[in-house]
Amino acid sequence: MTSVNATAPSASPHGQDGESYRLSLPNTARSAGIARHFVASLLTGTPHSGVVDDARLCVTEVVANAHRHTRTSLIRVHVTVGREQVTVSVADDTPWTAPAAGATSDGSIGAGHAQECGRGLFLLEELALAWGSEVCGCCSPSHKAVWFTLAGDAGATAQPSARPRTAIQA
């Protein structure tokens, strides 16, 4: 089941005020495309229309990673559209664990795997004003979220006060 929730302006977990939208998707191969269209529809025709392509690319990569690398039943997309920035967070119900370097999803080491993995995070690094990950659940991690912030046309000259990063492998 796919569900969409919109709320009145509120604060995002990253301190950004704005309109908040949520989308819950089943963990299927179609989820990345649905999330891509969802984010694009929120930003097209707004002061953030200049970052639609970057937002589409970044959310596709993060949702595809959640689909490929977790067994979560639901992938949750949370978008906060502020005056100057857009923050997108993608959460799954799998606690974060670091995969072995070069390991494939079945645990084996593929010859070209190191060249194929992690490029989505490189895109976040290049396109986002800031990005990172959060592990939720304190001492007993229950899920994780990967988030990114893009500066809209109004915030294109904004300088990040800090570029938080969390080292993760896709």
Image: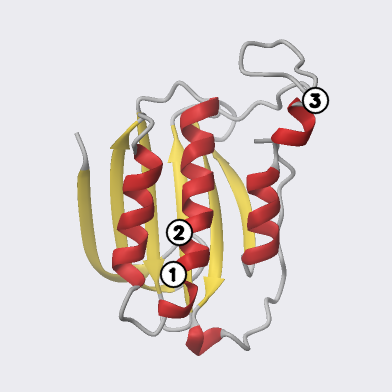
Rendered position, 109 above or below 56: above
How would you rate the neighbour count of disc 3 (Cα within 10 Å): few for under 14, some for 14-19, many for 20 or more?
Answer: few
Q: For marks 2 and 3, give the CA distance.
A: 28 Å
- Seen at 38% across and 31% down, the residue is 29
Instruction: Tell me the number on the disc at residue 101.
Output: 3
Instruction: Tell me the number on the disc at residue 52.
Output: 1
User: Residue 117 is drawn in which quadrant?
Assistant: top right
Q: Nearer the viewer, mark 2 or mark 3?
A: 2
- On the image, the x and y values in percent for residue 16 come to 47, 72
Q: Is residue 128 left or right of residue 73?
A: right
Give the residue type at disc 3: Ala
* Secondary element type, mark 2: helix
- On the image, the x and y values in percent for residue 24 come to 29, 42
Q: For marks 3 and 1, give the CA distance.
A: 33 Å
- Seen at 31% across and 47% down, the residue is 34
Whether residues under marks 3 and 1 lie with C-beta atoms below 8 angstroms apart, the answer is no
Name the image quarter holding the N terminus: top left
The residue labelled by disc 2 is 56
How would you rate the neighbour count of disc 2 (Cα within 10 Å): few for under 14, some for 14-19, many for 20 or more?
Answer: many
Whether residues under marks 1 and 2 lie with C-beta atoms below 8 angstroms apart, the answer is yes
